[in-house]
Image: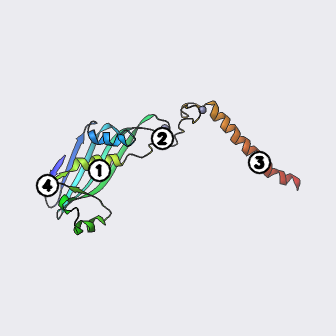
C-alpha cells in the first residue's frame, strides 16, 4: 500500500486497507530469525491518516489484527490480539543528514525516511505490528509454565515435583509459625 507524495492533498488523506494473513512475508522471516515466530492469525485491518508538513509526512493509524504466538512459559500456541495506534514521521531520504531533520527528531515521534516520491504506508504498518510483539509472549496471566524438573504443563496438571515443593514451602511456614509463637508461650 503506497501513496505518492504529490498525491497527498494539503488537508491530508485517509488510507484504509485489509491484508490477508500471508502479508507479513519476508519481514516475518527476518523477525523469526531473531527468535519468536510471528504469524498472522487474522487479516490485518488498518486505517492510516496521511498528512504533509513541508516535505515531511506524518502517518497516524490504527491497526487491528491477531497473531499466533508461542507462549514463552508453557510453549503453547495462543492468539494474541493486536489493536494498536501509531504515529510515525517520514522525511525525504535526501535529508537524512541535514540539520532540519535533526530538529524534527527531537519531537517524540518515531522518525524514518521515504525514498523518492513514494510513501510506503504498508511497510510502516507491518513494522508497527512486529514492534507490538512482546519479547516474552505469555498466553494468559498468570501462566504457570512448564515444570522445570519434569516438563509437565502446570496449567493442565500438577506433577509430583510441584507437590513436593509446596509441601516444603508449608514446612518452612510451619516452623516459622512455631518460632513466632514460642516467645509468647515463654512469657
Ligand atoms: Zn503459557
Ligand atoms: Zn514436575
Mark 2 lies within 8 Å of ligand 1 (Cβ measured) = yes
Residue 173 rendering spot, x and y as whole percentages? 72, 45
Which secondary structure, mark 2?
loop
Mark 1 lies within 8 Å of ligand 1 (Cβ measured) = no
Residue 34 rendering spot, x and y as whole percentages? 37, 43
121 versus 144 height, above or below: below
23 versus 113 height, above or below: above
Q: Which residue is mark 3?
A: 177
| Mark positioned earlier in the residue sequence (2 or 1) | 1
Count of numbered badges drawn on the protein = 4
Q: How crowded is the residue under tag 4: few (<14 C-alpha within 10 Å), some, or many (20+)? A: some
Q: Is residue 112 left or right of residue 152?
A: left
Residue 109 rendering spot, x and y as whole percentages? 30, 61
CA distance for labels 3 and 2: 34 Å
Q: Which residue is mark 1?
A: 62
* In this view, the mark in front (4 or 3): 4
Residue in the image at 24% along x and 65% along y: 101
| Mark positioned earlier in the residue sequence (1 or 3) | 1
CA distance for labels 2 and 1: 24 Å
Residue 140 has which mark? 2
Residue in the image at 27% along x and 40% along y: 26
Q: How crowded is the residue under tag 1: few (<14 C-alpha within 10 Å), some, or many (20+)? A: some
Q: Is residue 78 left or right of residue 54?
A: right
Amino acid at each position: 500500500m503506497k501513496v505518492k507524495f504529490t498525491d497527498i492533498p494539503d488537508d491530508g488523506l485517509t488510507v484504509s486497507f485489509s491484508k490477508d494473513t500471508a502479508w507479513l512475508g519476508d519481514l516475518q522471516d527476518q523477525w523469526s530469525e531473531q527468535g519468536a515466530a510471528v504469524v498472522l492469525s487474522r487479516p490485518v485491518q488498518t486505517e492510516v491518516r496521511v498528512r504533509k508538513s513541508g516535505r515531511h509526512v506524518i502517518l497516524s493509524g490504527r491497526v487491528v489484527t491477531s497473531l499466533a504466538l508461542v507462549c514463552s512459559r508453557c510453549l503453547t500456541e495462543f492468539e494474541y490480539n493486536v489493536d494498536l495506534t501509531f504515529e510515525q514521521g517520514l522525511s525525504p531520504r535526501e535529508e537524512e543528514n541535514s540539520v532540519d531533520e535533526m530538529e524534527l527528531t527531537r519531537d517524540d515521534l518515531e522518525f524514518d525516511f521515504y525514498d523518492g516520491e513514494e510513501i510506503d504506508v504498508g511497510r510502516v504498518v507491518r513494522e508497527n505490528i512486529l514492534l507490538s510483539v512482546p519479547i516474552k509472549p505469555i498466553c494468559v496471566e498468570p501462566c504457570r509454565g512448564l515444570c522445570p524438573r519434569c516438563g509437565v504443563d502446570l496449567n493442565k496438571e500438577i506433577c509430583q515435583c510441584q507437590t513436593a515443593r509446596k509441601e516444603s514451602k508449608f514446612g518452612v511456614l510451619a516452623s516459622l509459625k512455631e518460632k513466632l509463637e514460642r516467645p509468647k508461650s515463654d512469657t
